[in-house]
Image (cartoon, grey):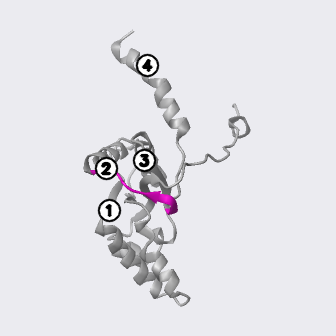
Amino acid sequence: MSDYSSTLNVAAPETLNLLLSRRSGSAKAMKGPGPDAAQLRRILAAGVRVPDHGKLAPWRFIIFEGEGRARMGDVLAECISQERDSSPERIEQERARFLRAPVVIGVVSRVREQIPIPVWEQQMSAGAACMTMVIAAHAMGFVANWITEWCAYHPKVLERLGLKPTERIAGFIYIGHPVEPLEDRPRPPVESITTRF
């Protein structure tokens, strides 16, 4: 057996245990510290190692940390304040939205059309980047939450973030530490969602 195979056999249980222990933590219940610069770079580096048919890199990342989170809150508050039914409480809630976690990664799905690679595959690659970064954060001892919420779909927010017409938000990945110990949720029994052909 090669050294590589031996390494895989030894690492497999630890890797599987990591995957089987992963769970989301609410963005509303996170605290610092978040990943430092080196840890964040490793999380992003993991995100670009996902399947990518055609080597298109059909995703890009926007980092919200430090004052950037407050600036994003200002954008959200401004957009909500223009809505007919906005209230002062809602505006302040949106101003604080990106302050819930010490670091937020916006994952932008950017597709190319009129090429042989289906748009759906490009979009799934962006989703894979989101999930891989969530797992990487978990492996480093952080908790992460992959969500979108209204701001991922609001045209004015997307414009302020500099998204092009061919780009969409695949998700915002909130990363921090849980305020309270996480409780697992029920998962579907594998047998109930699996068939054999």
- Neighbour class for label 3 at 10 Å: few (<14), some, many (≥20)? many
> What label sits on residue 10 in the rendered view?
4
Q: Which of marks 2 and 1 is nearer the N terminus?
A: 2
Q: Is mark 2 on a helix, strand or loop?
A: helix
> What label sits on residue 40 in the rendered view?
2
Marks 4 and 2 sit apart, C-alpha to C-alpha, by: 27 Å
Residue 177 vs residue 10, the one in the foreground: 177
Question: What residue is disc 1 on?
Answer: 65
Q: Looking at the picture, which amino acid does disc 3 mark?
A: Phe
Question: What residue is disc 3 on?
Answer: 142
Instruction: Say if mark 2 contacts mark 1, CB within 8 Å.
Output: yes
Was residue 34 drawn as part of the magenta stretch in this picture?
A: yes
Residue 187, x across and y down, in percent: 66, 43
- Neighbour class for label 2 at 10 Å: few (<14), some, many (≥20)? some
Q: Looking at the picture, which amino acid does disc 4 mark?
A: Val
Is residue 123 at least partly visible in the picture?
A: no
